[in-house]
Image (cartoon, helix red, strand yellow):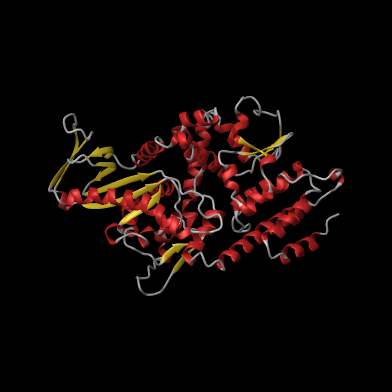
């Protein structure tokens, strides 16, 4: 019988992640996989239902549960009884202890400056803010690619996969039950349990092995972490596959256009100026012009131990974000340098046709937005901290945050609310940042009349935003969850 009080005391005393993993290996050997899955998945689901009460890293819970699931079970372990609530407490304690040890280690790592430490922790322990409905829609756009990469349609099987990541029952899925095994390529979405061990977490990144996978396959069943965020692995498997290299950029542009045109009538996709320069998306709205450039490059796993983080980030930032900012700026200068401009459907001067024309360009308000598929951490949220003066008035935002902000703004007071926020986000309020590098918290802070405080630059005053500011998007989450249910039931 486990002495849970003593177990908690042991965990508290450990000073290295490897010690905690060793404890877990011994502890979970006496618990079979069915019972472990019950413990881990209930903790994961509790965390999603009540974030305030269960304030540990969801991603870390998922990754540790995956490692702990592969530990071999002692013979006769089925004779051991356990207290489910106490076991859940043990698992949560392990999660928090490993987070504490790793973050403390990085504080004393001279290779990481303060800002980069924040990014490291956010990247390693947070999931991107992608709603399950957004995954559902994205997989429709990647239909052909997913079929080519996995040998099956993620879109057509989405309802089955959703049951896997959302059900509170059958937390360890027995082989041959339900939809499992009906598709010959279904196993492509699961990693073999023999390919995972504790060294993957300590010395490498589990995400590399987990890329493209929904869960882990054992000889008798499947372990699927019960959170829709696991769909990130499937999306990564598509985006980082060489087959998507020349396609994903066009898909992001189309996806962005389809989202934005729900709020604007006049949006133009792939337009060329008189010199043949391409602009991804251009919005014309009354006296306002918005240039949008879309970048789908991945923010790859560069934070394994924080080594060389700064130089790699800056190089990637220059290649992706700055390049897109320059393309937006080119569009702005084209307008400012001409009283009237024409955009065409091709860069071939002999065959091109006029698509639209903008007159009295100097009377227009001009905004620039760079839309990315990745979170880019605070390189998106506070990108103007790193941009040259000519590009500081560019808003860098991931497409999922943009969709949420557009929808929520429109529901508050029409599209004018969005323009007010867009103006605010291009004015260099660098002293306001969120705890988790989240654009949604920025919007939540801005929209709240109780927190209308924006410190000026140079005052050495910082405002750090917590998760409570993202509650403004609860209506969005509820609305699109209902929309997902309706579309899946068609």
Q: Between 155 and 54, which is closer to the camera in this rendering?
A: 155
User: Could you say where residue 27 lies in the image, as x and y percent from the top left?
Assistant: 78, 53
Q: Give the side of residue 424 with respect to residue 344, left or right.
A: right
Residue 443 in sight from this viewpoint: no
Residue 47 in sight from this viewpoint: yes
Rendered view: 367 above or below 103: above
Q: Between 400 and 415, which is closer to the camera in this rendering?
A: 400
Q: Give the side of residue 30 with respect to residue 54, left or right.
A: right
Rendered view: 56 above or below 172: below
User: Could you say where residue 156 lies in the image, as x and y percent from the top left?
Assistant: 53, 28
The answer to which quarter of the image holds residue 202 is bottom right
Position of the N terminus by quadrant? bottom right
The answer to which quarter of the image holds residue 226 is top right
Q: Between 48 and 335, which is closer to the camera in this rendering?
A: 335
Q: Give the side of residue 214 with respect to residue 274, left or right.
A: right
Can you name the residue that lies furthest to the bottom here? 459
In the rendered picture of this protein, how many numbered marks are placed on residues?
0
Q: Give the side of residue 288 with respect to residue 437, left or right.
A: left
Instruction: Name the residue at 43% across, 49% down.
Output: 401
User: Could you say where residue 377 lies in the image, as x and y percent from the top left?
Assistant: 46, 55
């Amino acid at each position: 019988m486990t002495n849970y009080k003593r177990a908690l005391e042991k965990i508290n005393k450990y000073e290295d992640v490897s010690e905690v993993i060793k404890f877990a290996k011994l502890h979970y050997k006496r618990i079979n996989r069915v019972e472990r899955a019950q413990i881990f998945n209930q903790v994961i689901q509790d965390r999603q239902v009540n974030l305030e009460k269960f304030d540990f890293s969801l991603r870390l819970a998922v990754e540790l549960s995956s490692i702990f699931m592969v530990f071999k079970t002692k013979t006769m372990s089925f004779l051991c009884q356990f207290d489910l609530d106490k076991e859940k407490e043990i698992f949560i304690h392990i999660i928090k202890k490993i987070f504490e040890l790793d973050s403390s280690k990085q504080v004393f790592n001279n290779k990481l400056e303060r800002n980069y430490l924040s990014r490291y922790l956010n990247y390693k322990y947070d999931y991107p803010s992608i709603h399950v409905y957004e995954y559902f829609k994205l997989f429709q756009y990647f239909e052909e690619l997913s079929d080519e990469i996995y040998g099956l349609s993620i879109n057509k099987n989405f309802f089955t996969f959703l049951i896997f990541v959302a059900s509170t029952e059958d937390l360890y899925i027995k082989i041959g039950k339900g939809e499992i095994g009906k598709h010959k390529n279904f196993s492509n979405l699961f990693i073999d349990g023999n390919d995972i061990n504790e060294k993957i977490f300590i010395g490498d990144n589990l995400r590399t092995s987990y890329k493209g996978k929904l869960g882990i396959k054992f000889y008798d069943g499947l372990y699927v972490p019960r959170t829709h965020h696991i769909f990130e692995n499937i999306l990564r498997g598509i985006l980082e596959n060489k087959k998507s290299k020349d396609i994903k950029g066009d898909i992001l542009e189309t996806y962005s256009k389809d989202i934005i045109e729900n709020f604007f009538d006049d949006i133009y996709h792939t337009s060329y100026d008189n010199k043949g320069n391409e602009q991804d998306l251009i919005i014309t709205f009354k006296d306002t012009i918005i240039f949008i450039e879309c970048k789908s490059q991945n923010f790859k796993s560069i934070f394994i131990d924080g080594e060389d983080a700064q130089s790699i980030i800056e190089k990637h930032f220059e290649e992706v974000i700055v390049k897109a900012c320059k393309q937006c700026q080119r569009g702005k200068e084209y307008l400012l340098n001409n009283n009237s401009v024409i955009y065409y459907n091709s860069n071939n001067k002999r065959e091109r046709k006029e698509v639209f024309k903008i007159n009295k360009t100097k009377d227009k308000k001009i905004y620039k937005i760079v839309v990315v598929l990745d979170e880019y951490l605070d390189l998106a949220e506070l990108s103007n901290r790193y941009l040259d003066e000519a590009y500081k008035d560019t808003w860098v935002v991931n497409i999922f945050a943009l969709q949420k902000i557009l929808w929520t703004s429109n529901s508050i007071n029409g599209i004018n609310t969005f323009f007010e926020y867009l103006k605010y986000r291009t004015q260099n309020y660098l002293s306001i940042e969120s705890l988790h590098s989240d654009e949604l918290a920025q919007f939540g802070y801005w929209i709240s009349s109780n927190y209308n405080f924006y410190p000026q630059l140079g005052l050495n005053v910082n405002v750090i935003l917590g998760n409570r500011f993202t509650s403004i998007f609860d209506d969005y989450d509820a609305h699109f969850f209902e929309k997902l249910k309706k579309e899946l039931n068609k």
